[in-house]
Image (cartoon, grey):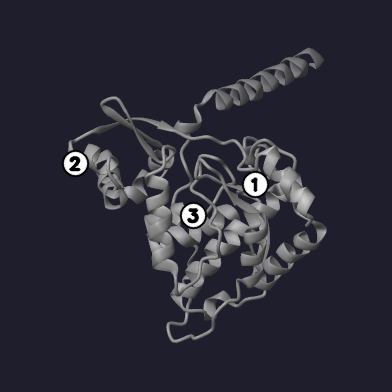
Amino acid sequence: MLELRRLDAVRTFAVVMFAAMWWLMIPVASQAAPDSKLWEHWTAHDPDSTTSVDHGKWDEFLIKYLFPGEDKIFRMAYGEVSERYRKTLDSYIAALAAVTVSELNRPEQKAYWINLYNALTVRSVLDAYPVTSIRDIDISPGLFADGPWGKPLVVVEDLEVSLDDIEHRILRPIWKDPRIHYAVNCAAIGCPNLSWHAYTARKMERQLGEAARAYINHPRGARRDGGRLVVSSLFDWYAEDFGGSEAGVLRHLAQYADAPLASAIADGVSIGGYEYDWALNSVAPVVADRLRKRGS
């Protein structure tokens, strides 16, 4: 009986190890993104509401620690954030958590959830820093969970909310706006830039359009490689949000493409590959040194 138990334990261990190795061997670009699945509670809103949410503290934090690089990628000085500004960030998130979101109008809600997502992402990185990738912050539940996205990080209207909830159960299914993918930031080099300013209801359309144009016309969004396009894995993971097919993705890209990308799409170029860089969007040492010298 003892030998049988040992054999069962060995078999169980072997199965778990094989599953873990199989998961790690899956290319990042082929891993499916969570489905867009509505959380009904957050559909409540007041179209007549004139209440606006104050995002001033988030603006203050971003202007202080977010830096545009010469390569047009925005990076965060995680390692230089002072205790004072950690408290500023915590205070901002706490203020958002205290908002009765269901009493806001739709544009205010959209800005609310985008800013909350980005602030929570930055705080998650700060809590774990130093890390080389957000995917190293393995706090999500589940044996093969990756990153911080599945763990509840805030309580809003007495409900625990995770980053996955905000993106896939609130923003995507309620607004069905593919430009949301250019607004929510996953703290990776391959991700669309974290905006230098908070999203607001009044400026939302302009901000989303600018974010889409900036990403699509940057090499990490789409670039020509011979007779094909290599595009961000975002357009693979969330293909359903971008038309559900390669043709749909190309139509979406064409809406925001500048020359020569627009010309390539018009000429009938096809998508030949997907790429994504999960390295942390942290500033270069020279920028960090400049920050230390001027004080924080």
Amino acid type at mark 1: Pro
Whole-Å distance between the Cαs marked 3 and 2? 32 Å
Q: Which residue is drawn at 40% across and 58% down?
A: 210
Whole-Å distance between the Cαs marked 1 and 2? 40 Å
Q: What element carries label 2?
A: helix
Residue 168, disc:
3
- Location of mark 1 (residue): 148
Amino acid type at mark 2: Ala
Amino acid type at mark 3: His
Check the image and name the residue furthest to the left: 267
Q: Is residue 174 visible?
A: no
Q: Which residue is drawn at 35% across and 47% down?
A: 240
Q: Position of residue 265 (x, y in %)?
A: 23, 40
Q: Which of 126 and 100 is in front in this view?
A: 126
Q: What element carries label 3?
A: helix
Whole-Å distance between the Cαs marked 3 and 1? 14 Å
Q: Where is residue 233 in the image (x, y as percent from the top left)?
A: 43, 37
Q: Which residue is drawn at 63% across and 60% down?
A: 63
Q: Residue at x 55, y 40 (%)?
A: 189
Q: Earlier in the sequence, mark 3 or mark 2?
A: 3
- Location of mark 2 (residue): 266
